């Protein structure tokens, strides 16, 4: 069975979903929309259509800006060509620039539109006489609650402060918990993170005994052609399953500084429950055979991914950001010319063995000829006439599309957002001793083909090791900026200087409220 045939099932459900409109459009709902809404939720399949529609709508935000693109630029991964790069607005945190304001308005509007649809779904789940079948209820409502928590948490991580005792009372964002067309008040960072945790706890209670992940696994292949219903509980990696929810909850507790609870969650509810027995894991570590499979390298280590969005046009990201054919001023590339003379030699302590180094990068050599064939003084400014070599990322490339597929190659369309290694990184950060922390880091490294042993004699040294491993693990997945923000780091790796240090103005971690929200609220701004 071909993978495109399988994913067509999920895509069909998505395109039928409640449309994602702007917040103002949502507030101005018409009676005809209400009739369509009642029709949608009149059948069990309608509930699944609405839920799938939210997942499919997430690609508009998480399929680029909050994974591969802007947010990773803001983490200073890439060489910004001495300030001449097309994405310098984001690299330099120019929040007053029109380009940033446009991005911010779009992210805010789309996220709250999705949240409006999620809340509508949640309310219909509990209506008297609901068409949602009993066996569907805990999974559908559990995932919907988790989606509401995740999107609010990411909005907080963008627009809220770096969380601590002095900043937790700062006003940040609204927490939209119903489908009413009212404007919700802005809430404190503490209020938001507590509501996130509350929703995740409710989601966990619903999923813990009902998530198909525990009985049928991730379910990456549809076993029959019976239609949408048979696919409702498959592809659990593309849904907020129990393990994704628990890891999200650990993230939230860590955000508010509760390391002991975060540690307990990842140890008891993630790492322990993932290990079914000595031989079997629900989300197994990637194997050498999987990673090195001929003509279809799995550079996402996809078997370890707890949650990813499905991006049917993911290869466009490669051509937009990474391909060597792009000029330097628009390509997201590591500073340097080859593995030994680049940022890779700084990030990776075992660059000649670590799969994240040896497999995920390609060297592009340019001839120095301008693409237009004209000799002029503007070549370098336009990114033309670049001479020499540079490195670009292969993680989201086209590998595997010409290979013979069996329908389980989910990684071809995945943008990972939560993965197994994060649970081990949280365990290491929250461990009681350096010795214990090193055990969790070593597990990750052994499954990345790293042969260099780590040492640490203090938790400060552990923190440095965790940071380095985090940088290696989440490249292209949009999590590093948030990690730096949680730590409120003032100095971290500078993507434009080999081995250089970027001095962060910590005020830049907090995005200003977007104009679209300020204008909606008027002069009161509450």
Image (cartoon, helix red, strand yellow):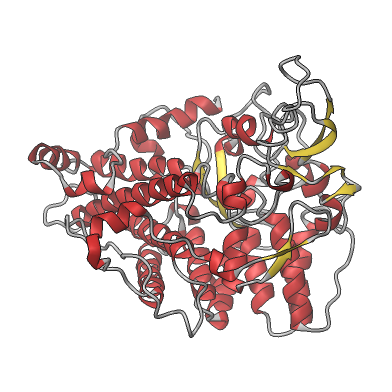
> Relative to residue 59, is residue 200 depicted above or below?
below
Residue projecting furthest to the front: 377
Q: Quadrant of residue 435?
A: bottom right
Looking at the image, residue 138 sits to the left or right of residue 24; the answer is right
Q: Give the percent coordinates (x, y) of residue 77.
A: 69, 52
Q: Residue at x 87, y 51 (%)?
A: 351
Note whether 457 is above or below 268 in the view shown.
below
Q: Going by the image, does 522 lie left or right of 513? A: left
Residue 426: x and y, percent?
63, 70
Residue at x-position 30% and y-position 58%? 518
Name the residue nearer the viewer: 425 or 227.
425
| Residue 144 in picture, x, y percent from top left | 34, 55
Nearest the viewer among 10 and 93 is 93
- Dividing the image into 4 quarters, which one contains the C terminus? bottom left
Q: Is residue 357 left or right of residue 482?
A: right
Q: Is there any visible trace of residue 272 in the rendered image? A: no
Whether residue 289 is visible here, answered yes or no, is yes
Q: Which sits in the foreground, 270 or 381?
A: 381
Furthest toward the top, the residue is 373
The quadrant in which the N terminus is found is: top right
Residue 366 horizontal/vertical position (percent) = 83, 27
- Nearer to me, 519 or 426: 519
Q: Quadrant of residue 60?
A: top left
Identify which residue is drawn at 53% across, 42% down.
64
Judged left or right of residue 145, residue 500 is: right
């Amino acid at each position: 069975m071909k993978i495109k045939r399988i994913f067509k099932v999920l895509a069909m459900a998505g395109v039928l979903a409640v449309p994602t409109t702007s917040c103002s459009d949502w507030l101005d709902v018409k009676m005809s929309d209400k009739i369509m809404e009642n029709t949608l939720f009149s059948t069990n399949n309608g509930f699944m259509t609405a839920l799938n529609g939210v997942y499919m709508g997430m690609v508009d935000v998480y399929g680029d800006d909050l994974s591969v693109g802007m947010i990773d630029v803001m983490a200073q991964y890439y060489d910004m060509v001495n300030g001449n790069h097309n994405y310098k607005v984001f690299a330099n945190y120019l929040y007053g620039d029109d380009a940033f304001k446009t991005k911010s308005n779009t992210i805010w509007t789309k996220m709250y539109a999705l949240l409006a649809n999620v809340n509508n779904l949640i309310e219909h789940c509990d209506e008297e006489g609901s068409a949602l079948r009993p066996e569907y209820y805990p999974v559908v409502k559990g995932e919907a609650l988790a989606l509401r928590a995740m999107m609010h948490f990411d909005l907080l991580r963008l627009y809220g402060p770096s969380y601590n005792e002095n900043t937790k009372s700062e006003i940040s964002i609204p927490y939209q918990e119903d489908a009413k067309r009212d404007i919700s008040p802005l809430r404190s960072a503490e209020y938001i993170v507590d509501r996130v945790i509350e929703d995740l706890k409710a989601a966990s209670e619903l999923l813990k005994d009902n998530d198909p992940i525990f009985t049928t696994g991730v379910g990456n292949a549809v076993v029959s052609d019976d239609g949408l219903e048979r696919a409702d509980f498959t592809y659990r990696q593309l849904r907020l399953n129990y393990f994704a929810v628990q890891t999200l909850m650990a993230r939230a507790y860590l955000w508010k500084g509760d390391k002991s609870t975060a540690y307990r969650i990842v140890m008891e509810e993630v790492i322990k429950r993932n290990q079914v027995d000595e031989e079997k894991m629900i989300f197994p570590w990637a194997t050498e055979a999987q990673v090195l499979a001929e003509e279809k390298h799995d550079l996402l280590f996809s078997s370890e991914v707890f949650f990813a969005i499905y991006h049917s046009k993911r290869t466009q990201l490669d051509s937009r950001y990474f391909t060597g054919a792009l000029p330097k001023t628009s390509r997201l590339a590591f500073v340097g010319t080859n593995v030994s003379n680049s940022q890779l030699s700084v990030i990776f302590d075992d660059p000649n063995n670590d799969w994240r180094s040896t497999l995920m990068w390609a060297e592009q050599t340019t001839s120095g000829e301008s693409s237009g064939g004209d000799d002029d003084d503007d070549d370098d400014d336009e990114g033309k006439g670049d001479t020499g070599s540079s490195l670009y990322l292969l993680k989201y490339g086209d590998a595997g599309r010409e290979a013979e597929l069996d329908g389980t190659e989910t990684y071809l369309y995945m943008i990972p957002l939560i993965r197994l290694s994060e649970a081990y990184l949280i365990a290491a950060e929250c461990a009681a001793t350096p010795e214990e922390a090193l055990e969790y880091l070593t597990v990750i490294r052994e499954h990345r083909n790293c042969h260099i042993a780590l040492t640490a004699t203090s938790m400060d040294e552990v923190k440095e090791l965790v940071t380095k491993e985090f940088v290696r693990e989440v490249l292209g997945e949009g999590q590093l900026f948030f990690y730096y923000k949680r730590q409120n780091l003032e100095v971290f790796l500078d993507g434009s200087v080999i081995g250089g240090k970027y001095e962060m103005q910590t005020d830049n971690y907090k995005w200003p409220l977007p104009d679209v929200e300020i204008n909606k609220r008027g002069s009161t701004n509450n």
